[in-house]
Image (cartoon, rainbow, N blue to C red):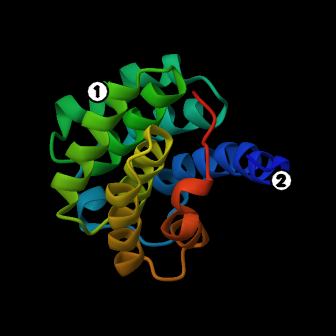
Amino acid sequence: MKPYVLFIASFLFPVFSAAQALVSQYSSVVSAQQLSMPHKAAKALEKGTALLLKNKPQASIPYFETVIELAPDSYYAYHDIAIAHYRLGLVEDAIREFQKSIELSKNSAAPPLFGLSMILYQRGEFVQAEALAQRGLLVAPSSPIGKILSRAGPVFSWPDP
């Protein structure tokens, strides 16, 4: 593999992961789901996301579990717990939670589509990864992360968690 490709991949992965974690807390659009979420669940989501942004994935998990318990239809919580599990090396858990987030959002949220796409690229499942990235771009057509993922192909080798 060409050195510049490894550099780009090693640079993009942390940026991608941080960008994914910011989605729940700093989205400029508040969804109906967030507005209807119980106050305690919204606070837990906020605290868990803050811990995730401080690179404390293990500490964030109980907060996301609280959100899932109080607001089981929250695709935000499943997305963020997927990132936490991925950072801890629990890739199968992350895959399952990204899938649940995608299911709950009815394919209307790009971040879990891009998150699962990233993992599939890492596993060498390029056709499925590209399809997810393309679906994410239908939701968020101007997403730089989505554009990179949709064009990455087999040239990228994502660093292990």
Q: Nearer the viewer, residue 54 or 9?
A: 9
Numbered-mark total: 2
Is label 2 or label 1 in front?
Answer: 2
Disc 2 to disc 1, C-alpha distance: 42 Å
Q: Amino acid at mark 1?
A: Thr
| Above-or-below relation of 17 to 27 | above
- Spot occupied by residue 79 in the image (x, y as percentages of width and height): 36, 44
Q: Is residue 90 above or below residue 14?
A: above
The relative height of residue 84 versus residue 8 in the rendered view (above or below) is: above
Q: Disc 2 residue type?
A: Tyr
Q: Percent x, y for residue 107?
A: 23, 65
Q: Which residue is mark 1?
A: 66
Neighbor class of circle 2 (other Cα within 10 Å; few <14, some 14-19, many 20+) is few
Is residue 41 left or right of 55 when viewed as pictured?
left
Residue 106 picture location, percent across and down: 17, 64
SS at mark 1? helix
Q: Is residue 41 visible?
A: no
Q: Which of pointers 2 and 1 lies earlier in the amino acid sequence? A: 2
Q: Are marks 2 and 1 in contact (CB under 8 Å)?
A: no
> Residue 96 occupies which quadrant of the picture?
top left
**Secondary structure under the numbered disc 2 in the rendered image:** helix
Image location of residue 116, percent across then percent down? 38, 48
Q: Residue furthest front?
A: 1
* Label ID, residue 136: none
* Residue 30 visible here: yes
What residue is drawn where x is 20% and y is 44%?
100
For residue 130, above or below residue 137: above
Residue at 28% x, 27% y is 66
Q: Residue at x 70, y 48 (%)?
A: 9
From the image, tell me which residue sits under label 2: 4
